[in-house]
Amino acid sequence: MVNNNEKEFDHYLDALKALEYILKQDDEYYQNWIKAIQRDIKIWETQHQSQQHLGHYGGMGSFNDIGGGPYFNNIKSIAFRLAGNPDDIASVEKSLGILGLQLDGLNCLNCEYIWTNIEKIETYIRNHFIRGEVLTNFKEGKLLNLVKKRYGKDLPNLDNKYKKITDIAVNSDIPIIRVKKKKFTCPKCGSKKYDFEHWILNNTGDRFILFKLDGNALSDDIKSAFK
């Protein structure tokens, strides 16, 4: 049982209502999930119970299988964390993890040439900046306000963000291929044999460094690059 009046913001309720709003943007497709989230909201408002929300996750066809973009995915993770302990606000940021916040690229297995492309840069920008936007509004209890204002719209100042990240990539010796493609051949030798590479910002935010998708291997100062 949680005394909701002791909290400045009702972060859990805010997250649930933000999820409800996003799902309602396609209410015919998600009507069953909308009803489930509305039940969670009612139970929280009347009984201050949150554990039932955890039952939506895990297994095939669960809430985890819904793909709704970075706003939805980040807020879904927040709701899951708070359903386990609505008062544990401090651990939410760490619980969101770091997958999806790295810049992805390719490494030619024949000549060892590395590169990324425009599509990966755009994905990185959206994931990286939306995570920061979500966390800022979560701390202020404004997730619902955020998705009402921003969901389904492009990022503000996208051109400036794109220039910033592309400049950092170039300064980090990561070539950017300007043509979007689903399948790649090496731009240098033409080989179709490649492996995946991943980079993250260093702790000063001015250079990309190699990253092996193991968040536990990151020092605290590098982890700050994901905020």
Image (spheres, rainbow, N blue to C red):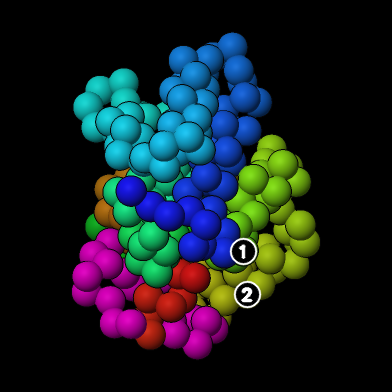
Assign a secondary structure to mark 2.
helix
The question of residue 174 being in magenta is answered with no
Assign a secondary structure to mark 1.
loop
- Give the camera-side residue of 116 and 188: 116
At 49% from the left edge and 70% from the top edge, which residue is drawn?
227
Q: Position of residue 186 (x, y in %)?
A: 40, 53
Mark sitting on residue 140: 1
Q: Position of residue 157 (x, y in %)?
A: 77, 61
Within the image, what quadrant is residue 184 found in?
top left
Q: Mark 1 belongs to which amino acid?
A: Glu
Q: Position of residue 205 (x, y in %)?
A: 52, 81
Total marks in image: 2
Q: Are marks 1 and 2 in contact (CB under 8 Å)?
A: no
Q: Is residue 215 toward the left or the right of residue 221 in the image?
A: left
Residue that badge 2 annotates: 167
> Which of the two discs, 1 and 2, labels the residue nearer the N terminus?
1
Disc 2 residue crowd, few under 14, some 14–19, many 20+, Cα 10 Å: some
Range of residues picked out in magenta: 199-220
Q: Position of residue 84 (x, y in %)?
A: 30, 49
The question of residue 201 being in magenta is answered with yes
At 47% from the left edge and 49% from the top edge, which residue is drawn?
12
At 33% from the left edge and 82% from the top edge, which residue is drawn?
220
